[in-house]
Amino acid sequence: MNKKKMIMIGIGVVAVAAAGAGFFLRTKQGGAAGGGPGGRGMGGPGGGGMVQEAATLVKAAVPTTGSLSLTTGLTGTVEAADVVYVYAKASGDVTDVKVKAGDMVEQGQVLCEIDTEQVESAKNSLDTAKVRLDEARSNLNRMQILYAGGDLSAQEYEQYTNSLKTAQLSYESAKLSYDKQVEYSTVTAPIAGRIESCDVEVYDRISQQSRLCVISGEGQNRITFYVTQRMMQNLRDGDSLEVSKNGVALSGTISEISSMVDADTGLFKVKADVAGSDEIAIGSTVKISLVTERAENAMLVPVDAVYYSGGESYVYVDRDGVARMTGVEIGLYDDEYAEVLSGLTYEDLVVSTWSSNLYEGASIRQKGAEEDSRAGAGQRPEAGGPGGPEGGSGKAAGSQGSPEGGSEKAAGSQGSPEGGSKKAAGGQADQTPAQ
């Protein structure tokens, strides 16, 4: 009997405990869900009614007018203003080299001598032509006496005269050929300047059109580089640029822009004059920075305001507190601003604040407007934290500082669960455990 009685008592204790736990849970859920005091839903005396979406704070401003430029980095080559490549005009053996790289030469100075193996032959031809010329001249002198005495006909006299003319032409041709062979064998500097390279040595066998020396003129060096057609169309003579080499930056201006495509590169060749470029060795590669595109008096918006989706660009515009996606056409842009070609007017308020809550139709409020509204109303936080005065919600449900009668957080969150009480004035509310 005692055993049966003990079993019944145990069952009763379990049933009472289960009922108490269920009541406790329902009580907590009611307070959190809004059925009881302090709930965020409908029905509780402290509830705030239907939950409304909080407006996203943004910055917005109308487009501005300004200028943008696109700076492009390129590479170029240092060249002398006057560069002459000296080539052999005849084949032969080099018999003497009188200069080396780095030497300064004057115009007409001998650079090297070449045995063209044609000088002697040309000299023999010249001597032969000279003998024939002298002979023809002597014969004509004798025939003049006979012609004057009537012992020679006019026809015969004319033949001797023509023979002299022919001999004279042969001599002049032989002399020209000889002079050319002498010139070919003695190579001279066509301009005054510096020997940049000398690629021959004594006893070298060279062929016609072999390069012998490179002479740079005494003028200022220049920079050459290549650009695309789009860049070329935006460049003008006199445009400034910056050249750098080994940490040294020099300023220059564009002096020549070719309108013909270079056969080797497929680009357009540009030349620039750079002050102080003589300090950089000819043939060196340098870095070039210049403006290749410009936009004057353009409509500008902050670059952070532009979004892209599927290759299309758009911005958000504030339309009476509602975010509206507006498609735009973007031109140039830099780290701060983007050029708007179409899609906006100067009256549109363009949102420049990024937010995950920003989408088509989202409720937005400008930060400056909120501060002005608070200053005009003379509001200041009351007891209960940063929320509004007692009885009115300072922020949407779940925000910090819920007023009295509205629960700051769900049961178990920060703030007292009893009746959904708010935080203590100016401080953090103590959580009172349920009994």
Image (cartoon, rainbow, N blue to C red):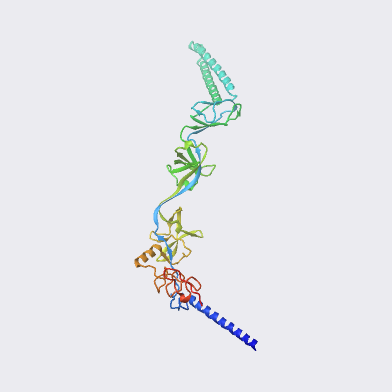
322 or 3: nearer the eye? Answer: 3
Residue drawn at the location 47% of the way across and 76% of the way down: 418
Residue drawn at the location 48% of the way across and 39% of the way down: 223
Residue 39 appears anywhere in the view: no
164 or 301: nearer the eye? Answer: 301
Give residue 156's position: percent from left, percent from top. Answer: 52, 16
User: Which quadrant would residue 19 be assigned to in this image?
Assistant: bottom right
13 shown above or below 293: below
Residue 19 appears anywhere in the view: yes
Give residue 166's position: percent from left, percent from top. Answer: 53, 20
Give residue 301's position: percent from left, percent from top. Answer: 42, 57
197 or 24: nearer the eye? Answer: 24
51 shown above or below 195: below
103 or 408: nearer the eye? Answer: 408
Give residue 129's position: percent from left, percent from top. Answer: 55, 19
Residue drawn at the location 47% of the way across and 59% of the way down: 307
Q: Residue furthest bottom?
A: 1
306 shown above or below 394: above
Quarter placement of the N terminus: bottom right
